[in-house]
Image (cartoon, rainbow, N blue to C red):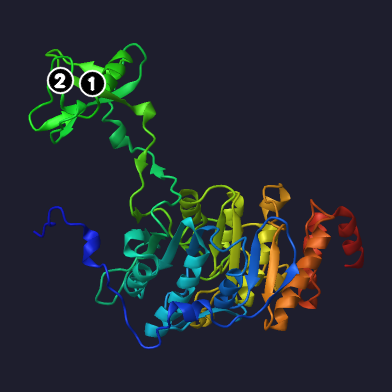
Amino acid sequence: MATGVPNKSHHSRTEGTCIAYKGKEEPSAILNGERVPFQKIHSGTSGKCLYFGENLLGLRELLSDPDVVGKVTLVYIDPPFSTQGTFLSRKQQKAYEDNLSGARYVEHLRARLILLRELLSDKGSIYLHLDENMVFEMKLIMDEVFGFSNYRNLIVRKKCNPKNYTRKAYGNIVDFILFYSKTDNYVWNRPVESLSEESKREYHYIESQTGRRYMKVPIHAPGTRNGATGRPWRGMLPPPGKHWQYTPKTLDEMDARGEIFWSGNGNPRRKVYLDEHSGVGLQDIWLDFRDAHNQNIKITGYPTEKNPDLLRRIIGASSNPGDLVLDCFVGSGTTLTVADEMQRRWIGMDNSLESLSTILKRFERGLFPMGDYVQQSQDITEGIPQQPTLFDTLDAGATLPASIENGEHKPIEDFSMFVAKDAPSEVYSIITTWKQRNNLLGTHKSKKLPVVSEPTNFANICYQLHRRDKKLAKIIDSVG
């Protein structure tokens, strides 16, 4: 069995290690590279921003913003995993491409990491979500960009249920999250898990005066000390080779509060109360955040959409209310909506029309299945049932979500939107439609209906209007 070398830091084994490849640019070239102006086309007052365009250019744009550079508390990014696939919507509109590999992929992501480091505050952290294809190469890049001493964890996440693999290998049910900080003075709200029933059974003593459950633990620890913790207390020395965990003065105070248990032969032990236990610190294997598609939860249906609870854990641990959270591979907008829910400011970026459309719908309507996206292009022909929808142009379901009907969902409207100068014209069409829809929705709080004009949906529209409005129902009945 291999054992560690005593008194040797594990950090020393990779200090100075780097990965070399053709086309690797100097950090200065990345920081001072091409810039393209972004135009503000929607104004908000909250400090929350959505950028449409190539994220390398968007991140460079932020370098000139004094309200952002050095002010970001948390970065979470879930970039393409180098799967060599094209991800499409039901109508075969491209959601995103994942066709980079090898050195091109590494340099593509490294450039963005270098820019992100400049945007992070000294109390900031970054979480990089990857699968087994490139996580090992990117671990070396993260060491290079952020420093090995700022490596915190390689989190292993169970992404799906077990699969019946036929290839000669173990089933692949996990992916990975690299967690780094910018310095050693980073925001950390220690996440804990509740004690298991088995752990609770260890607190089997009951205090007669209060009824509180407790367990008994030693008040000494290994190793000798020459200070106060090595001196006698109540006429007793610590056991050989040990020292008191607390000074004699502190032990007296604990005893006065009834927190010391004395055995029949005079052996003192500390009482640890069950009701004072905040929980067990979270470990680096996460089994409870499978992909949204693998759980019975509300989702948009966007390819590779992540579980909102995964983002709640990360955002809660590494930021505080009012802090700035950034995601430059924003996809369906999970990071942004969870950050908004948790009272964080946010910046999101993407260059996919499907992403922009999905995010705006999600801001407007909340979480519920909005469409029939599929994961890869070859899946399109595998007999996916085509469900009729009320608003096909929106990829929306036939009924409004209950979250809007009962007022649970508060639309996200107070944010600024920026579009790259070279953005396709379809971007402006999507945004204009969104603005028109929200202007109309603002006057009908209880009956929020988007505007559509496609004749193929006329029957569905009539059906829904018939259900929602008695006067309209009479008119529709009168004309058949």
Q: Which of pointers 2 and 1 lies earlier in the amino acid sequence? A: 2
Q: Quadrant of residue 299?
A: bottom right
Position of residue 227 relative to residue 313, above or below, is: above
Residue situated in front as seen by the camera: 211 or 182: 182
Is residue 212 found left or right of 327 in the rendered image? left
Position of residue 21 relative to residue 285, above or below, is: below
Residue type of the residue flagged with mark 2: Pro
Residue situated in front as seen by the camera: 42 or 23: 23
Distance from Cα at disc 2 to Cα at disc 1 = 8 Å
Residue situated in front as seen by the camera: 374 or 194: 194
Residue bearing mark 1: 248
Identified at 60% across, 59% down, the residue is 346
Residue bearing mark 2: 232
Residues at marks 2 and 1 touching, judged by CB atoms closer than 8 Å: yes
Residue most extreme to the front: 227
Is residue 240 found left or right of 172 in the rendered image? left
Q: Position of residue 402 (x, y in %)?
A: 67, 51
